[in-house]
Amino acid sequence: MGYYARARNLHKGAKQLVAIIDETGDYPQTLEGWEAISGVGPSTAGAIMAMGLHQYGVICDGNVKRVLTRWAAIDGDITKSATTKKLWALAIRLTPKNNSGLFAQAMMDMGATLCVRRSPSCSLCPLKDDCIAHAEGRETDYPVKAKKLPKPSKFSNALIMENTQGEILWLQRPDNGIWGGLWSLPLAFIEKVTASELAKPVEVQPQKHEVRSDEKVYEAEFTTAEQIINEWLIENELVAQSVSNTLLDDAPIKHSLTHFHWYLQPQKLIIEDGKIAELSAKLVAANIIFKWLDHKKAHDSLGLPRAMIKIIEA
Ligand code: SF4
């Protein structure tokens, strides 16, 4: 989701800034004002205050966190909010009230040039005399990050619904969520059923875990359009054919999100003209934005996510 969401936030943030400048004649002048801009987090807002506006501002980005966890030997998991709070408190305590921009720049440069991830240049570092990690020879033990669990996998069929002219149905995805605003084939989200699972009926204990945002997005991604299409396929007893013989486990298109791998299995379905008109009417009635376009036109004229390009190029 990262890059598309970032681009959307950048655009939204730029528009917000233009509106603020139109209204006030200037950029926001407070930390809160910057934090209200889409895509600007507390550290970016602090950096703008300190370095852009030469006011008081605190930064605590990845580079600064690495320096601080080593210097103070903070051994909490850096991905946990308790550790983040501790690091912010330390950054606030260390940041001078005057010239906080110089301090912020120095901390960022330290993290980027000396206190680097793999082999920090401690002998050149101005903090070496009171850095705990250096004194203990444990520089690269920090920052502490809990080992990542392997990502779970989720599975979907990507329906290549083709009319007799070789045009394919494309849906514009809702603005929020995976591939927001881009165009996609209709997807049928399905439960993972693997050959090995079918063979041995293992009792699976559901694991207690935090539901992460992209998991929620996955659940919500079964859009209205896809519900209409999937119900219509069932009503019409139309069964899509898998375009390859692979099991879903080995589905040819793999799309990795932050917290799960998403496997897409293309499935082809030729639909006769009368049925196309019926389905299109249903989609129009539900205000769904869709197009019937052949591969080339879709490729050339629609904003397609990488996974969809892989499907049409396969
Ligand atoms: S002494 Fe080494 S580990 Fe400590 S802050 Fe400097 S570069 Fe980082």
Image (cartoon, rainbow, N blue to C red):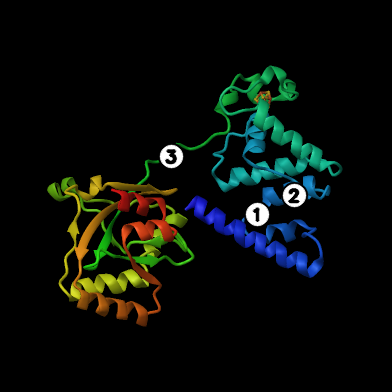
Q: Where does residue 182 sit, x and y in percent of width and height?
A: 44, 61
Instruction: Please say if 88 is above or below 214.
Output: above
Residue under circle 2?
48
Q: Where does residue 145 sit, x and y in percent of width and height?
A: 51, 36
- Amino acid found under the numbered disc labelled 2: Ile
Residue under circle 3?
148
On the picture, is 152 further left or further right than 113?
left
Q: How many marks?
A: 3
Q: Secondary structure at mark 2?
A: helix
Q: Is residue 154 visible?
A: no
Dot placed on the residue nearer the N-terminal end, 3 or 2: 2
Mark 3 neighbour class, 10 Å CA radius: few under 14, some 14 to 19, many 20 or more = few
Q: Quadrant of residue 22?
A: bottom right
Q: Is residue 248 visible?
A: yes
User: For the residues marked 3 and 2, what is the alpha-carbon distance in whole angstroms?
Assistant: 33 Å
Residue at (19%, 65%) from the top-left corner? 270
Residue under circle 1?
40
Q: Where does residue 293 sit, x and y in percent of width and height?
A: 33, 65
